[in-house]
Amino acid sequence: MNVAVAQATLSGLRLFGSTSGNSLPAPLPTSHVLRYANSMLDEKDFQKKAATAFDDLKRRLFTLGDEHGFDVEGESGKLEVIFEEPVEAKFVVSPNTPVREIWISALSTSFKLGWSDSKSAFILEKTGENLFDVMSRVVSQQLGTQVKL
């Protein structure tokens, strides 16, 4: 069985590769260690950036909802976009603090957006779209008409 092993020391964290059996492997090169963790926002910074993005998104969705006949509800740190026409649907936008992402559930799909320092926005890595672009796309698909947040 292969098991990843980490050894904590007073001077920091030493990571090891996989093991098979009882012997410990050599440490991984430091260039491979904690690449993702170092780029992750701390919790307070994520919450601040997510709250700012949510406030802006909510404001834009309210305006668009008034124009196109859908409802927007925000409670418990999430947004719900509720459509009655042309087909009933509900989109949910929520922060996922442990992984520092904003998650969108829409059109039977889950979109996970992470913070990009270079773009100063939450970005869907797969497409490069920001939060407003993704929401514009899925709302447009739901309504059957092009909209822009």
Image (cartoon, rainbow, N blue to C red):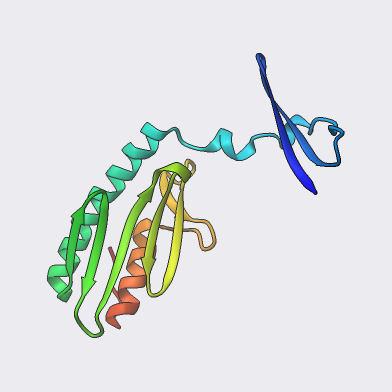
**Left or right: 65, with 107 as reference point:** left
Q: Looking at this view, is 129 or 20 the one in front?
A: 20
Residue that protrudes farthest toward the bottom in the picture? 86
| Residue at image coords 19%, 79% | 84
Tag count in the figure? 0
Q: Looking at this view, is 7 or 28 the one in front?
A: 7
**Whole-percent x, y for residue 86 in the image:** 23, 85
Q: Looking at this view, is 54 or 17 the one in front?
A: 17
**Left or right: 86, with 15 as reference point:** left
Residue that protrudes farthest toward the top in the picture? 10
**Left or right: 94, with 18 as reference point:** left
| Residue at image coords 27%, 50% | 54
| Residue at image coords 73%, 33% | 31
| Residue at image coords 24%, 80% | 88
| Above or below, 55 relative to 90 | above
Residue 105: image quadrant is bottom left
| Above or below, 81 relative to 94 | below
Tell me the quarter of the image containing the C terminus.
Answer: bottom left
Q: Looking at this view, is 141 or 111 the one in front?
A: 111
**Whole-percent x, y for residue 12 in the image:** 65, 20
| Above or below, 19 relative to 71 | above
**Whole-percent x, y for residue 133 in the image:** 37, 62
**Whole-percent x, y for residue 101 in the image:** 43, 49
